[in-house]
Every structure is written in C-alpha cells, then in structure tokens.
Image: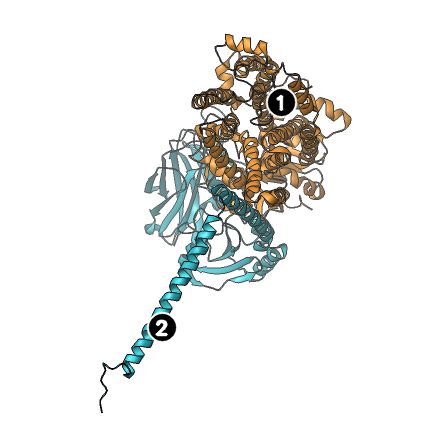
Chain colours: A cyan, B orange
Amino acid sequence: MTVDPQRGDAPGRAWSGLAARLARHACASAAERWHATGAAARLLWARRPSASRAVAGGFAVVLALAGAVGVVFQGGLPGRLPDPIDWAALGALLERDALPGDAVAVSPGWAERARLAAPGAVPLLSPASWKDEDLPGVKRVWLVSLPRAPGFGFGVERALLARSARPEPAIPLGGLAVTRHALATPERPLAFLPDRLAHAEVRLGGAPCARDAAGFRCPLEGGGAAEVLRTVRQVGGAPRPCVAVPAGAGAALTVTFPAAPMGRQLRGHAGLAGDPPRARDAAIRIALRVDGEEAGAVDLAGDGWRSFALDTARSAGRMRELALSVTTTASTGALCLDAMTLR
Amino acid sequence: MTSALFTAGAQPPAPSSRAGRLEELARALRPGRRRIALAWAAAAFLGLAAVAGGAGITADEAAVLSAARGGAEGDASAPPVLDRGPLAPLLARAADATASRIGLPHRVAVRLPALLAGALLAALLALLGHDLAGPAGALLAPALCLLVPRELVLSATATADGLSAALGLGAIWAYRLAGRTRRRLGASVAAGLLLGLAVAARLDAWIILPVVAVHALLERALRRGSTERSTDAPDGPGGEDGSDDPRAAALEARLHGVPLAVAAMALVAPLVLAAIWPSLLVPPLRTFAAAVPSGAGLPYLGAPLAPPRPPPGYPLLLTALSVPLGILLAEAGGLVHAVARLWRARRPGPPALDAGDELLLLAGAIAPLAAAQTGIAPLLGGVRAWALAFPFLALLGARAILAAARTAWPARARPLAAALALLVLYPAARAVARGWPALGGTWNELAGGAPGAASFGLQRQERGEAAHAILPELEARARPGARVVWLGVAPEAVAVYAADGALRPDLSTVADPADADLAVAVLDGGSRDAEYRTWAAFRTSRPVSGVFVDEVPLVLVYARPGAWR
C-alpha cells in the first residue's frame, strides 16, 4: 500500500508543517528578543553618560589603577629581590664548591653585592660582553642571577650558554639563582704579561726607566716623569687589568720581559684608559721582538678595548726574551695594555 | 594687606563701587585661602627640614658651598666666588654665618634658604591651586609637587635649582596678579624683582620673560577674537584697559599697550641682576659661559651624556621615568585638560573660561622642558634642568583630579577626589621613604624602580649624595687614624661632614688611592675608573661594606688589610 504524499494527513507533510511552525516560532521569538535588546540598547544609549563624564570616569579609573600599580609595585619589590640570607647562602656555596680557575658573573650587571658575598679567592668578572671577550685563566663561571628583579634580561645567560660545555641546572637560593657553566674552550695562558711587570725592564725612547715601589718612572724630555704601572683601568666600559703606560711621552716605550714562556700566539688588548678617555681616536702601534728579532707588529685604530694577535709559533715551547714596543698618537692620558702568551 | 587674587574668570570690582570694595575686603579677610597657604608653608618647611637633615651633599651642592666659602680653600673670610648664579652661594653663606651660631649643623644651616624657598613654593602653589580649583586644589597642588622625590630633594638642598624654581613661580604668580589686582604697579615691580632673583639663582630662568611676553600677546589675541565674535562680551579678568589703576593705565599707554608686568620684568630684573651679580656687566659672555655647569658624562640609557644638547626626548623620558606613576598620569591628564579648556575658551559667546590662565599654565609647564631639550637650559643631572615645570604640572594635575571627580560622580565628588588623591599620593610618599637617602636617583614604576633604572643604564644618584649614608659605619669600623680617599665625593662635602661631626676627626683625607687605607667609592652609573685603580692599589676588588637601595649599590667601601674592623 502506498500513501499519496499530496494528502494533508500524509506523515511527511505533517512533519514539514511542524518544522515550519517551529521555525516561524523561533524566528518570531528571535525577532522579539532582538527588538527587546534593541530597545534596551536604545534606552541605555539614551541614558548614556555625557562624553565629558565618560572621559572623566575613564581618567579616574586610570588614576586609581596607576595608584594601585604603584602600591603593588612598591609592596612587591622586596619579594623580588634577594635577602641577606640569600647572599650568605651564595657565599657558603662558593666557599664550599669553588675551585681555582672559577669566576663569578652577575646578571643584571649592577648586582655587585655579590662582591661582598663571594670569597676573596673567587673573582667577580664584569667584562663589557660575555659573548666574545677573552677570559684568561677562567675554566668555570658561576652565574649569579636575580631573575625576578626589574629589568632582568637573559643576555648574560645566553652568552654563557653559547660558551658553555654543559649547562647545569640552576640552584635556587631565595631571590638568587646560581648556574655553573664549564667553559667549552677555556683560555689557559702560559703567561699574563702584566703580572710579570715586576721582573721586566722598561725603556722610554731608549733611556731606561727607574724601578720604584709601584712600578717604573720614566724621565721625560721636558722634565718630570711618566709612570708605568700594573693597574686596573676602565676601558670600553669594563675594568681591565693591564700595564698603564703614558700616552703623551713622545717616544716609543718598550717593556722587555726577560724570560717569558712562549706559545703559538701572543694575544693582547690595548685602549686609552678612562671612560671617557682624555684623548680619543688615537692610533696605537705595537711591535713585538723575540730575542731581539722583529716578530710582528700591529696598528690599532678606533675607540675602546681593541684586541690584537701575533703569531709566535716559531718560539713555541721555549723561554724567550719578549719585548713589546708601544707608540701612540695620543698626546695625553694613559694607554692600557695587556698581553698573554697562549699555547 | 588687602590685595587679593580673584578666582579664575571672576570680574574684579570697579574701584568706584563701594559694594565692590567691601566685597574685596571680605575676600581678603576670608581665612581659608591664606590659612591653607600658611599651613602648607609651615608644613613644607618642617618636612623639608627633616629631609635636609639626612640628605647627602651632591657635587653641585658642594660647588655652591665652595663658592659661598670663597673658593676651594674654604677660607671663611674670603669673598664668595660669584662666577655662577650668585644668589644661592650668597644666601648659603649668610645662613651659615647666622644659623650655625645657634648650634645648627652646617649642612642644615646652608640649606635654610632652600627650605624657605620650598615653603614659598608650597604657599604659592596653595594660593594658585585655590584660585584654580578651590580649597581642595590648595590642599592638593603642593602635595603633588613636593611628593615628587626629585623635586622634594631639590627644595631641601642648597643647589640653585629649587631656589630658582620657587622664585620663578613667584615671578609668574606676581605677573598673573598684576592682571587681576588694583595694585598693578606693585605686583608688576614684584614680578620684576622676583624674576631678577630667579635669574641670579640660575641663569636660564630668563626664559620666564619670553614666556610671559608670548602669553600676554596670545591672551590679548584670544581676547580680541572673543570680543569680535561677541561684541557684548566683557573684558577678561583684571580689566584690559587698566582703568582700576590710573597710574598703571597711564604707564601702559606710554608703553604702547605692552603689559605693565612684562615691561617691569624686562626693566627691573636686569637691575636686580646687576646689583647682585656685578661681574655679569664686565665680561658678560665669559661669565655666561662659566655660569653653565655641565652634566656631561652622566649616564643616560647606558651611554654618557654629551654636551651641548641632550638626546631627543631626554626631558620627556626622564620625567616619564622618574615622577611617580599616579602623579605622572594626573599631570598628563592636567595638560590635556588645559588644552581642552583652552579650545573651549575659543568658542563664540561670553567667555566662560579664562584662557589666560590656561595659556600661562601650559606655557609654564612646557617652556622649561623645551628649554632643556633645545640646550637653552644647562645640561644637568636628573630633572633639575626643567625643575620650574613641576609646580605648573602639579597645578594642572591637581585641577584635573578634582575636575574628574566632580564630573564623573557629581553626587560623591569629594569622597571620590579624596580617594583618588590618596591613591596618587600614597605610592609617591612611599617612594620617598624607599629611595632615601638618594632621592636624586629615584625612579618610578615604569622604570622598574632603582633596579630597573640601573638595568637601563640610568643615573643611580646625584653625584655624591649617598656618601652621607656610609658615615655611621665608617665611624664605627674604620681603624683609628685611617687615611680615606673619597671617590666621587666633593672635598667641600667631606669638609662639611667633618665640621658637623658626622666624620670622625681622626680620619684624614688623601687624594691618591695609593696613599689610602680606605676608599669610599660613590657609584652614579657613570665612570668607575678611579674605583678600579683603587682595586689595583689595594690589591682587591672585594668591598668591605656598601650602601644599597633595592640591591643597587650606591656606595662601596674598600679597605687595606687591617683598616676595617
């Protein structure tokens, strides 16, 4: 038996009628809600605050928020910084675990309370950049971070990670985090020449300089004397252990180290001391003589801490007399010079 | 004294009107306005005295003290050195000679003129705040100015900056008064006197004269335009024709319409300046050049500042990072509010708003910032170069807070205003307590406080100011007879500490780290070359003590073995 779909009582027709009614009902109620919402919106819009009142209200809210931010910031700052006990814990940790060849780095760079906390045998280094600066004699670096301090960045962490053989997990010490980095290629100098200045001879323009308690005093042509010292000076924004030589002496200054252990390379740095230096953009010429023979020379130009390297492979593995001769176009101030022999 | 300020937009009574005179008398006797000003002056003096008792001596304050004592030798009988702005040294010398006799420490005695100038600043702000926003404005405006930590310390130390700002505000206040009072001549002369004194304190205060001259021109143009649009509009406050003071009107007629106060400032100020600073007349150019101290070398975003002009945006950025956030936003809102009011004042019809006040406030706030940016003002540390802007910003901020409360919730305007004021002022007061003793290096929430600012390479303190905080420990722990080298602390500051008994008499001062047993190194974020040389001389880079604010070192002490107990 078949049912004529055109009949009114056919089941399909009944279902479609019901769906249509439901759809009409849904449409009607949606339209009603839409009208009600619209009416409410129109009512609210009609009762909206004036523009000036809205601006004033917004300004008051912003002021209140700013005040709250101030209160929260001031109140929360001590919790983001280390306590004295955290620094004491750092001191104890370094006292216990630090080895010769270890050094401390801080991040951010201003967190120099670590200088007070660290044992005297573990130096705190603050080079201008941890990315590529020489770290002579350093095998491991203890990075002391204040990760919750305002202005903290990961620049030092990234630079040390790039130089690190195997990163170790950070040790949390309250507001501090301490991470030990073993350097992948530590520089082990055979000799850091500024440390040998006491055994050196110094000449200015061929005339010998007199040794005194602090270093050497070189007589100047116009009277007076210029000092050659083992010191620490600020060059390029960082402390540099170096030999300070007078820049305006007018003649070549030669520092001769009588028996220096030689390696494949002599690497060093030079720059005008002071920040800013008294003279700028001075050209510097450094000549190296080994056992009285010319072994190379470099010309350095520009500001800051400039590095140089000279090949000494011919003398590697022997003790040799090594003479560094320095001339500069700067007429005043001092030149900061370091050099080390590398394997 | 019966002269009185009229509130903005009010019409001064005609002199011939008996009722008007009575009303003026009643206004003058009304206690609220002046009582608030006096109370603020007293409170500011006491509060600033408390700050002055503990604040260290910066290099610039030491220069003032050196000039007051007749040079670096500190010979009290020598005449003062007046090659820079001479007013601050002269006042410091006079105050020291007077107040130290009654047992006040020298450090506080030399700061007494600055404290009085701070009290004057607070009183003037209360008066102007009252004129602009009623009693609540009188209460709020001085607080908004003096709770900015850097402005607070300027008003508590003997540098010329706070003195010049107070006198400059006084000159502008008198200029404004000259347009609104019957005693126009007296107010005009007072404006000239105060301007002369402000310039004698700090040379770049001369910018006030072009500011008021331009203000007078613009105000006249605005008023003329308004009158043309609405012929029945009355003259602005004070009466354009000066009919209330016949002598003033006659003088102004001779001056071809130049406002009397502007003319008085142009004529009287140079006379005052020449009387106080005679050397200015002999070699003016050389004196002008010598009068500008330099902040070259101070750290700014990790690099040293280089003269003659600061980097673009320097005053704005430093203000944005050093004024407490709530006050900063209130002041920014105040600037926008003033511009909006100025715009509304241009509408045709009777003037409902005093465009002159809006112009004056905007010019007073913006001109010092522009002068600092363009190099007209000297390159100084911190916000000192544009210290004159802060009183105007405070007035604008106070009015904006009160106007916002009144407009946003008229039925609860007072409680809302009080709540907003509390929310804005409390963090600022706390920042003052937190930044102590180095208020000259206080940074706000946007900078991240002292740690954030140090990370950005900003200045940590005004040169030498935190050294005072290490003195108690030095007294307790330095070996008897130890020789101390002071790195970054002016010799005059050390001499004052010693004279006040804050420094143990057996401790001697040496100039070379090689000769010293102890080294006190002040860290301002700039060069540390001298400190590093001390490392070499002492054979250690490990300090024995220090002064820290939020872990940022401000002072480090180094010692040879046995020199620190």
* Element at label 1: helix
Please count the marks in the image: 2
Image location (x, y in percent) of residue B448: 52, 47
Q: Can residue B434 be seen in this snapshot?
A: no
Q: Residue furthest right?
A: B102
Mark 2 highlights which residue?
A22
* Element at label 2: helix
Label 2 in the same subunit as label 1: no
Question: Residue drawn 43% across and 30% down?
Answer: A249
- B234 lies above or below A23: above
- B196 lies above or below A264: above
Image location (x, y in percent) of residue B493: 64, 31
Q: Can residue B105 be seen in this snapshot?
A: yes
Separation of marks 2 and 1 at Cα, in angstroms: 93 Å
Q: Is residue A257 left or right of residue B122?
A: left
Mark 1 highlights which residue?
B89
Along the line of sight, which residue is nearer the eye, B514 or B169? B169
Name the front one of labels 2 and 1. 2
Along the line of sight, which residue is nearer the eye, A48 or B167? A48
Along the line of sight, which residue is nearer the eye, B65 or B352? B352
Q: Is residue A16 left or right of residue A257?
A: left
Decide: few, some or many residues near mark 1? Use Cα within 10 Å; few <14, some 14-19, many ≥20: many
Question: As shown in the figure, which amino acid type bears the numbered disc 2?
Answer: Leu
Along the line of sight, which residue is nearer the eye, B188 or B281? B188
Chain containing the residue with disc 2: A
Question: As shown in the figure, which amino acid type bears the numbered disc 1?
Answer: Pro
Chain containing the residue with disc 1: B
